[in-house]
Amino acid sequence: MPDATSCDGPGSEIPATGFVEDGYELWLRYRPLEPRYRAYCSLLLKYVVLPTVMLSPILAAARDEINRGVGGMLGCAPSSESAVSADGGLLVGSPTTLPLVASLDLPLDGLGREGYIICPVIVNGFATTVIAANEEIGLLYGAFALLRAIQMGRFDADTKIESAPKSRLRLLNHWDNLDGWVERGYAGRSIFNWWELPEYLDPRLVDYARANASIGINGAVVNNVNASSESLTDPFLEKAAALANRFRAYGLRVYLSAKFSSPMESGELATADPCDAAVKAWWKQTADRIYKLIPDFGGFLVKANSEGQPGPQDFHRTHADGANMLADALEPWGGVVIWRAFVYSDDVPDDRVGQCYSEMIPFDGLFRKNVILQVKNGPLDFQPREPINPLFGAMPETNVGIELQITKEYLGFETHLVYLGNLWQEVFSTDLDARGCGNIVARVIDGSMFASRLSLVAGVANVGSARNWCGSTFDQANWYSFGRFAWNPDCDADEVALEWIMLTLTNDPNGMRTIADIMKMSYETAVNYMAPLGLTHQMGTGHHHGPAPWIEDTGRSHWNPTYYNCADAKGIGFDRTDAGSGTVRQYSAKLARLYSSPYDVPENLLLWFHHLSWGFVMPNGKTLWEEIVYHYDRGLRGVERNRALWSTLRDTIDPARFYEVSAFLQIQARDAQMWRDACVAYFQSINGLETPEGSLRPTQSLEFYKALTFRHAPGSPG
Ligand code: BDP
């Protein structure tokens, strides 16, 4: 049996050891600035004034970061002063902690708790830069923003940056188990070593918190959504408290995934029925225990009645019953319940794609105020491309947040170069009623569309014990851009990519242009070789790596790729129009009309909504079959193009990272070829059509691809 992971030799020479750039510092590298800019910045940052009385942990973190950053970039840390004494200083404070800031009368009103302003001011006749905020956490975020501007070469005497997050909760979801294994993790083991906690706290945890704070992430769910009830036992709560103590100075709150059946698994109760008085009391006591240990505990994330996880329906109760019971337990402490909308069941015959909508819609207005529904970006499951989840904009009386997947479970793990910023921009900017009037997903997520009380952007983390945190250099860009989009869902993916490139890889103009070019097309490229034109869920079962469009016999019909491609001798695609499953009607009337027509639906969603004949004529005159193969080919060409572009950067990028990216691009090229060839071969076996003119036949037989195994693929539960 061929082993799918065999590969030709490395794409470039393996660098000698002893190199410096191992990726650990992420985008916080603070390398020396070029001499002229350094001299200029040194004049503007001669000293720093912070409130000195009772320096709080957050302010100490801000001071340390400024010292570290300025020290690294300018060669010496600014001196600490207690008052403005000469031209060229940095003032860091809030009106309440530093009277000087109060006297400046800065426009802080609209900045909330976490926003900040950085601007030039004259104090006592001296030119000064101020970082001001209403609360200390804003000062820390402001410090990171200033350091970012300096690193990117964008700091000058007139620098004015004003920013406040648009969503209240900006969370990483770690799918990390208590034994250190990470579900869908491609970057080593968990960074949370529960075995050694609470006595030993890896210094790396501080760097993790710094990295998150630098991009505005303010919470982490530290255990898997497929949760263990042990997480709520005293020993594990003490461990979680140790994490919370470490993270607090960076504004990062700890949250826990809660298993719904915990009262039963604890051995204390015979039921977990959310309407049972003893169950309610159990959760209240649990909340009390948690808050005694972790006073700023964020709340619970719950996966209930989904993929075999227990939930209120096991007791003939509803999602609202379950969520509200937990919400009541957390409410006195200010905690929130994040209830996942990712629910589907194989026992339900309906189109799986429509199930989370049908399940949740009846509960609009019935959830407590401290409940927020966490909705995956698409209605299926983080597939390479999905339309927007129809729940967005459809639950005006409910707090609705979004769940994105940073770890690339369905987009090539750590070895495929796929920048997700463009995907997220596509998601956030989707117009919900297709009127172009600004009713976009971002307005649901920032809470402004329905004046929601809570807003949330959550991302399934791609962080692990790998030295470079994410398993690959370019996956760091996905952690970075997640933070930037969570802070501001209206940001521009290309601009975020450019920031990351400057902070992480190079300031060389040609290098920046080339890498930005690579990143910009990388998402579309992957979609092309994996699931073009709205095809979906074509990956192998369980491990989710590599193509398997032929699989039709997993235990659950909803896990079969054939369920989604519906390929037969006549055509391909899933009919979700009124003539088919009808789930298109879950969208607003305008969107439903748009998606219902194979001529109007965006081409990249064509086969998501329509079953069409192989000979269907596309607007460009090609048949559907020709167009499908053309897209697979385009995916291959995209990877080859990126390899060629990257190869020009040998003298721009340090050897270690240059080598890693080169080798991974070679793996991506091999995998892209496999995806393309396996899918084309399978569909040809169904439609009997020749490979279109100008395209190559698959390099191997269908049997070859079917026989491939992906033993030891990481991150898979089974
Ligand atoms: C699927 C993953 C599975 C997760 C599930 C979820 O394959 O490991 O448990 O999502 O989101 O995509 O709960």
Image (cartoon, helix red, strand yellow):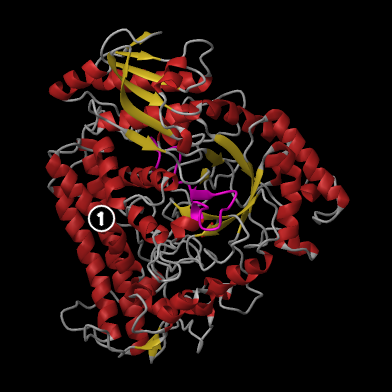
Is 252 in front, or is 17? 252
Instruction: Determine the residue positioned at 22% across, 78% down.
Output: 697
In the rendered image, residue 418, in percent from the top left (x then y), is placed at 32, 54
- As rendered, which of 417 and 159 lies closer to the eye? 159
Query: Quadrant location of residue 319?
Result: bottom right
Question: Mark 1 highlights which residue?
Answer: 520
Q: Is residue 12 visible?
A: no
Ligand 1 picture quarter: bottom right
Q: Secondary structure of the magenta portion, mostly?
A: loop
**Location of the N terminus (image quadrant):** bottom left
Tell me what residue is drawn at x 35 percent, y 49 percent: 491
User: In the rendered image of this protein, does residue 580 appear above or below residue 124?
Assistant: below
Q: Position of residue 647 (x, y in %)?
A: 15, 48
Residue at image coords 38%, 8%? 83
Local SS, label 1: helix
Q: What residue type is disc 1 on?
A: Lys
Residue 466: within the magenta?
Answer: yes
Q: How many marks?
A: 1
Q: Would you place residue 481 above or below residue 139 in this image?
A: below
Magenta residues, start to end: 445-470
Query: Is residue 660 highlighted in magenta?
Result: no
